[in-house]
């Protein structure tokens, strides 16, 4: 029952199709999803797809269930041997990576790749976003060689294969369905969404000591899944395994529209958690000691202490500094650490002091994957609320929370029977006292006119040709800001495969270690998004306790005036500040 559909008007012309995020109505255009899936199969090659085992699941957002049935039928028609689906189509992005790497099917099969259905931290629902991406056999995002091929294929594709006669599979029930077609056997294996991931987490962390922390009277905990897929894991891990109260879980029932919210774990969008932790508007008067949130597909995390925000750039540095003592998986040492270019240099200082291999890579997790596959990197992170390790090839929101709980459990190992709790805030402030503090903020200008965004970037590149002119301009704006020492567009040569990635963001590096970075987002679904990253280093431990926005105000002023942000974009303020 294999049908071959010939297509008239299939041309897709948007590059970031291969990166996922688009409005649902784009995906539901006739043949649009089909085009992407067939283009992916063609990019992988027909021989590779024949007989393969493919994972298909995601964060459960609107349109996922339809998409899963379509992909199952296309996998069958393209000769795949079996498709694995998390129950109800739910698998977090990190769980997909874990399943690809670790799961063994009942018949001994292993996965060859995965379609992940998510638009990450973007809203869901009929009028919101959907997305799809392909991960490889190592559990990590497809490399540029493949995504470029997929994109090229989407422009020339004329036909796709779909087994239209295959009945829809009930993805709510665990079990294996067998089908036999003209090309032989085809199975759909629906399995528990969390058990492989939970098993992996238990092999990395000391659950006993975390449980002792969570259940001790001095400690209190809360976790907000923002109605994303993290909810499917939070109950299993935090409540059933680690003894947290059910009432410590907020928004942990996955919903197709994320309850109408924006499943992005930051101070702007995770409002309920922020208030619960005693921050923002209408703060709770008795916040818990620890709070965290995840994005829609649970690869991002935000960590909060009582009335205290941990920047993601600090978070990865603190995890790296404490991993060996606190987390059994790292007890024999770290192979190396890495951060994305716009992430603050807090990690650099730790790497230097602990004499660790260190890498600065372009934005996006796939660059870390290459380092990890080569055994060069154990812990890595991005300023965009992404933290992770070489246990998988994606960033991992729940892993980051377990890492923080491990550090807290270790620091409090002798305090839990009545001593004074070492808090999240204590740990961060102690870190600043040891390594200095990187004041940091990011301004996002979302849905800006694409032409205007390009002009702004071109203007900034042009300025780089004369650093002395830049410094004259800066002095006119703020005389209290240091001189720019150098400025460039970030370029990365992958130390493993030698590939070169150009134009990865515009940098202005100051003599005192401060930095301004400007980038265009590669994941936005409408118009262009300009990201401005602002960082200032303070070594003097008597000056590390200041308010971040106050401290950064001079640099912010310089960044906005130098870039002519308002002139180009018409915006007097960013959409989001993190
Ligand atoms: C953003 C973040 C980047 C992250 C990417 C994917 O990209 O800045 O750090 O890797 O999202 O995150 P951009 O190009 O919009 O700045 V996720 O949670 O979709 O895997
Ligand atoms: Co995400």
Image (tube, rainbow, N blue to C red):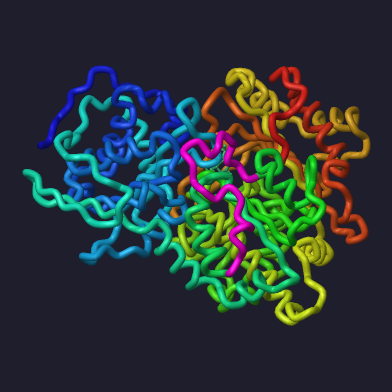
Residue 560 image point, x, y percent: 78, 29
Is 18 on the left-hand or right-hand side of 250? Answer: left
Residue 404 sits in which quadrant? Answer: bottom right
Is 195 on the left-hand or right-hand side of 539? Answer: left
* Residue 367 visible in this rendered orientation of the protein: no
Closer to us: 366 or 562? 366
Residue 41 among those drawn in magenta: no
Residue 309 image point, x, y percent: 75, 52
Residue 252 among those drawn in magenta: yes
Q: Give the range drawn in magenta.
A: 243-265
Closer to us: 215 or 269? 215
Overall secondary structure of the magenta section: loop
Residue lying farthest to the left in this orientation: 182
In the rendered view, would you say 412 is above or below 567?
Answer: below
Please tell me which residue is depicted at 33% across the width and 33% down the height of the picture. 36
Residue 371 image point, x, y percent: 49, 58
In which quadrant of the rendered image does the N terminus lie?
top left
Residue 270 sits in which quadrant? Answer: top right
Residue 568 image point, x, y percent: 70, 19
In the rendered view, would you say 221 is above or below 71?
Answer: below
Please tell me which residue is depicted at 86% across the width and 47% down the height of the picture. 547
In which quadrant of the rendered image does the C terminus lie?
top right
Closer to us: 516 or 526? 526
Please tell me which residue is depicted at 89% across the width and 59% down the height of the picture. 540
In the rendered view, would you say 363 is above or below 522?
Answer: below
Residue 212 sits in which quadrant? Answer: bottom right
Closer to us: 122 or 211? 211
Is 553 on the left-hand or right-hand side of 130? Answer: right
């Amino acid at each position: 029952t294999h049908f071959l559909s010939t297509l008239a008007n299939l041309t897709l012309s948007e590059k970031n199709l291969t990166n996922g995020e688009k409005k649902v109505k784009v995906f539901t255009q006739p043949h649009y999803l089909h085009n992407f899936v067939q283009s992916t199969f063609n990019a992988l090659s027909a021989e590779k797809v024949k007989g393969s085992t493919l994972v298909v699941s995601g964060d459960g957002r609107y349109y996922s269930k339809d998409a899963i049935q379509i992909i199952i039928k296309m996998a069958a028609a393209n000769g795949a041997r079996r498709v694995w689906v998390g129950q109800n189509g739910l698998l977090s992005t990190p769980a997909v990576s874990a399943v690809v790497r670790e799961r063994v099917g009942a018949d001994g099969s292993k996965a060859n790749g995965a379609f992940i259905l998510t638009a990450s931290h973007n809203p869901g629902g009929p009028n919101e976003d959907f997305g799809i991406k392909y991960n490889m056999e190592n559990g990590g995002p497809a490399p540029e060689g493949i995504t470029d091929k997929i994109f090229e294929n989407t422009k020339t594709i004329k036909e796709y294969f779909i087994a239209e006669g295959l009945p829809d599979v009930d993805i709510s029930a665990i079990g294996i369905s067998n089908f036999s077609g003209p090309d032989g056997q085809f199975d759909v294996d629906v399995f528990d969404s969390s058990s492989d991931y939970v098993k992996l987490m238990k092999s990395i962390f000391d659950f006993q000591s975390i449980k002792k922390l969570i259940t001790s009277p001095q400690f209190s905990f809360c976790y907000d899944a923002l109605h994303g897929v993290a909810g499917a894991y939070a109950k299993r891990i935090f409540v059933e395994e680690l003894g947290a109260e059910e009432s410590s879980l907020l928004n942990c029932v996955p919903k197709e529209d994320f309850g109408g919210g924006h499943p992005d774990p930051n101070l702007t969008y995770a409002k309920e958690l922020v208030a619960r932790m005693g921050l923002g508007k209408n703060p709770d008067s008795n916040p818990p000691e620890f709070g965290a949130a995840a994005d829609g597909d649970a690869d991002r995390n935000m960590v909060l202490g009582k009335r205290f925000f941990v920047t993601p750039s600090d978070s990865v540095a603190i995890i790296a500094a404490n991993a060996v003592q606190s987390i059994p998986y790292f007890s024999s040492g770290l192979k190396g650490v890495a951060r994305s270019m716009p992430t603050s240099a807090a990690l650099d200082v730790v790497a230097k002091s602990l004499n660790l291999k260190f890498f600065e890579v372009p934005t996006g997790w796939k660059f870390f994957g290459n380092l990890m596959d080569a055994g060069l990197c154990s812990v890595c992170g991005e300023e965009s609320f992404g933290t992770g390790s070489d246990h998988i090839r994606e960033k991992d929101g729940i892993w980051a929370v377990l890492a923080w709980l491990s550090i807290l459990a270790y620091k409090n190992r002798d305090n839990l029977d009545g001593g004074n709790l070492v808090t999240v805030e204590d740990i961060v402030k102690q870190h600043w006292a040891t390594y200095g503090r990187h004041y940091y903020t990011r301004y996002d200008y979302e849905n800006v006119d694409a032409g205007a965004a390009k002009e702004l970037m071109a203007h900034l590149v042009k300025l780089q040709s004369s650093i002395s002119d830049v410094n004259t301009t800066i002095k006119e704006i703020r005389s209290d800001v240091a001189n720019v020492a150098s400025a460039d567009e970030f370029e990365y040569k992958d130390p493993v495969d030698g590939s070169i990635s150009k134009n990865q963001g515009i940098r202005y590096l100051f003599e005192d270690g401060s930095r301004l970075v400007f980038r265009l987002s590669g994941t936005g679904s409408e118009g262009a998004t300009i990201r401005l990253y602002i960082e200032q280093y303070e070594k003097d431990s008597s000056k590390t306790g200041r308010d971040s926005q106050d401290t950064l105000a001079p640099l912010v002023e310089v960044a906005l005036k130098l870039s002519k942000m308002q002139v180009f974009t018409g915006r007097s303020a960013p959409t989001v500040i993190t």
